[in-house]
Image (spheres, helix red, strand yellow):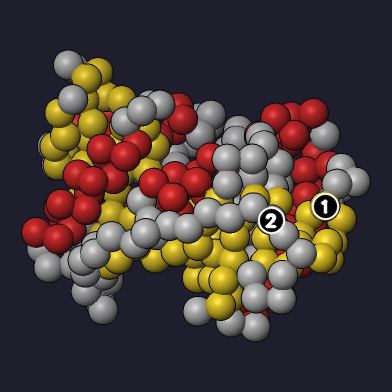
Amino acid sequence: MRFQVIGDVPGIARVATYYAKVWETTEDVLSTETLHCIRHAGGATIGAFDGDELVGATTGLFCPDGSVYSMIAAAKHGVGYSLKQAQKDWAVGLGAKSMRWTYDPLVSRNARFNLVKLGAVVTEYTVDFYGSMRDGVNEGDESDRLTVQWDLTSERETRESEPAGEVTRAAPDGEPLARTDGERIWCRVPRDIVQVRKESAELAKQWREAVRGVFVGAFDTGYVATSMSRDGWYQLERK
């Protein structure tokens, strides 16, 4: 596997096409013009290559506080961790101490990757972050997003625990949605929200609103999300 910063015109165009393919849209997710502007402003698009095949890409830019904002990332299965480490190396090499990005709170595999594999923490829930989206993956759903904060200077040890305590909310499928033991909160999301969307837009909407209710209330009272279990339970703890 090879990782490289991409700055040439054909390479940038190839990444723009790759992003559009992953998000199942004929429209630009990030246009070639936007990617060139990011590069010119000191950001970077990093590609992952298996031979000549582009199997992953991520684009980030520097913020006024010296952190890096990772705008987008996509990769073939098994490539994401190494790609994120390559982006970390680029950021640390330029003096960044932290990185942040957003993701859909209902996508449990992304949550586990971010919180458990990378050791990042979720610090913010934003309702309808982008407004209406028209790509093939998100169309018809509200674009709620969680903000991830990744400390690039040290590794965080993640602690997973089984959901415990009182059930405080029920999920759209009738099973427990949220539990609390008085200190921690656990919140469950679907195993595969993309499949849920395909089968029932109404059920996906119900999951969105249910999870939103747990997270917004928790973050308003000083919680952050620190882990995600294999069976779809977020763990939230006080800061």
Q: Is residue 148 visible?
A: no
Image side of residue 28 versus residue 90, left or right: right
Asked which secondary structure carries label 2, the reply is: loop
Q: Is residue 90 visible?
A: yes
Three-letter code for the amino acid on which mark 2 is drawn: Pro
Image side of residue 200 versus residue 5, left or right: right
Which residue is painted at 72% across and 70% down in the image?
Answer: 181
Which residue is painted at 25% across and 38% down in the image?
Answer: 82
Disc 1 residue crowd, few under 14, some 14–19, many 20+, Cα 10 Å: some
Which is closer to the viewer, label 2 or label 1?
A: 2
Front in this rendered view, residue 41 or 201: 201
Alpha-carbon distance for marks 2 and 1? 10 Å
Residue 41: horizontal and vertical position, in percent? Answer: 18, 62
**Residue to which mark 2 is pinned:** 163
Mark 2 vs 1: CB contact within 8 A: yes
Quarter location, residue 168 = bottom right
**Residue to which mark 1 is pinned:** 176
- For residue 193, above or below residue 163: above
- For residue 205, above or below residue 213: above
Residue 104: horizontal and vertical position, in percent? Answer: 57, 51
Image side of residue 208 versus residue 135, left or right: right
Residue 46: horizontal and vertical position, in percent? Answer: 21, 41
Disc 2 residue crowd, few under 14, some 14–19, many 20+, Cα 10 Å: many
Three-letter code for the amino acid on which mark 1 is drawn: Pro
Asked which secondary structure carries label 1, the reply is: strand
- For residue 229, above or below residue 20: below
Looking at the image, which residue sits at the far left? 93
Front in this rendered view, residue 56 or 183: 183
